[in-house]
Amino acid sequence: MTETTTEFIIDENVSACLGQIKKMATASDIADVTPVEEFKLLAKAGLLKITLPNQLLDFKQKHTKKLLQLLKEVGKANLSVGRIFEGHINALYLVHLFATDSQKNTWYNKVLNNDALFGVWNTQTSNGVKFVPDNQHLQIAGAKTFCSGAAIVTHALITGNIDIQHRKGWQMLIMEMSKIGEANIDKSCWKTLGMKASGSFNVDFTGYKIDNKEFLAEPGQYFKQPFFNGGAIRFAAVQLGGIEAIAEETLAYLRLLGRMEDPLQNTRIAHIMTAVTAGNLWISQAGDNFDKWVDEPAKSADLIAFANMTRTAIEETGILVMKESNECVGARGLMHPFIIERLYRDLSFYLRQPAPDATKLDIATYFFNKFNEEKSA
């Protein structure tokens, strides 16, 4: 739909992989079914390892713009798969930032040799995770919610409170899901409007015996800026993929019905395509800015503000495109065999990210502070 810079990774094999994932999306739209085959395809196409050292999108080489384009394309094929894949990339980025060389060797080799799938699970309720002493060892007590890909993730980066000598605060830990019993994964909780295939179940980690080598970084590093807020551009890119999918399906529907000459429909399409094009510009610039600013402390506030604006702009783009598309296709377009109905549900749910109002307040604060600094200079 829009020209991108992903030709070097969206080659024939990757394109075929994403095409297959798109075809499987309707069958995967069931809450207790997880996209196992889809991630086998991603692994075979080399996408699980793509950000590791000496790979095409090696984090050390600052390929954020291209990575965002890839995330968009995966989201375009299936938003649920895109959500889990983005969690994998997020986890590997945190490893890249904070792991020791020994830890990197261990976890990177799991991806390279075993197609390991990583995830990041931070959300919790009142029975959240704590790392607590158990005789001479430490173990996990508590659970996480919204654990995307819980049934297929092999290595989960979870967070929890720790209060022992030398470690106090909010701690990251990467644990092996093979040591968590099936009974600890609550699939019944995932009764959702959309993103069913993401399998974002509740997981109870109570009793997991901790190896000290599984602790990632010191307490407090999970929220380190600008990485924490700056990372919002990754899920925004996946969301944009779903938005593009809706736009393309809307065009296909109008073509099928022979309504491409209808002036009212054309007006709606103009709104849709203008918004999608603007979304691509936001994502592209966000990638450029991230790579230019992430290592400059003086630019941290700028990076966070632009990331916040990007996620806000993409959310507003999604809402606008769904509204205009809905008016284009009407009730008939929301019925089998058209897939727009599922795309609406998935995108509506995925757009609901944490603290949207606080994010907008932070944007305003950034510009007020900048204005005051300029006037005081």
Image: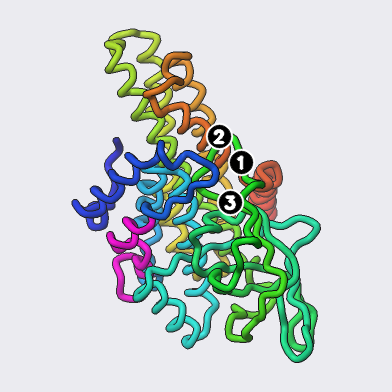
Residue drawn at (36%, 42%) of the image: 24
Asked if the residues shown at circle 2 and circle 1 are in contact, with their CB atoms under 8 angstroms apart, the answer is yes
Which mark is on residue 331? Answer: none
For mark 3, what is the residue?
A: 200
List the residue tagged with mark 1.
Answer: 352
Residue 236 appears in the figure: no
| Nearer-N-terminus badge (1/3) | 3
Which is nearer the eye, 263 or 350? 350
Question: Which amino acid lies under the numbered mark 2 shown in the image of this protein?
Answer: Ser
Where residue 163 sits, quadrant-wise, is bottom right
Q: Is residue 332 above or below residue 341?
A: above
Corner quadrant of residue 166? bottom right
Q: Amino acid at mark 1?
A: Arg
User: The residue under label 3 is which amino acid type?
Assistant: Ser
10 Å neighbourhood of mark 1: few (<14), some, or many (≥20)? few
Instruction: Report how far apart the C-alphas of labels 2 and 1 lie in the structure.
Output: 7 Å
| Tag of residue 348 | 2
Q: Where is residue 352 drawn, in percent x and y? A: 61, 41
The residue drawn where x is 44% and y is 56% is 85
Image position of 267 (left or right of 200): left
Rounded to the nearest whole Å, what is the CA distance between mark 2 and mark 3? 16 Å
Mark nearest the camera among 1 and 3 is: 3
SS of the residue under disc 2: helix
Residue 145 placed where, x, y %?
67, 55
Pointer 3 local density, CA inside 10 Å: few below 14, some 14–19, many at least 20: many
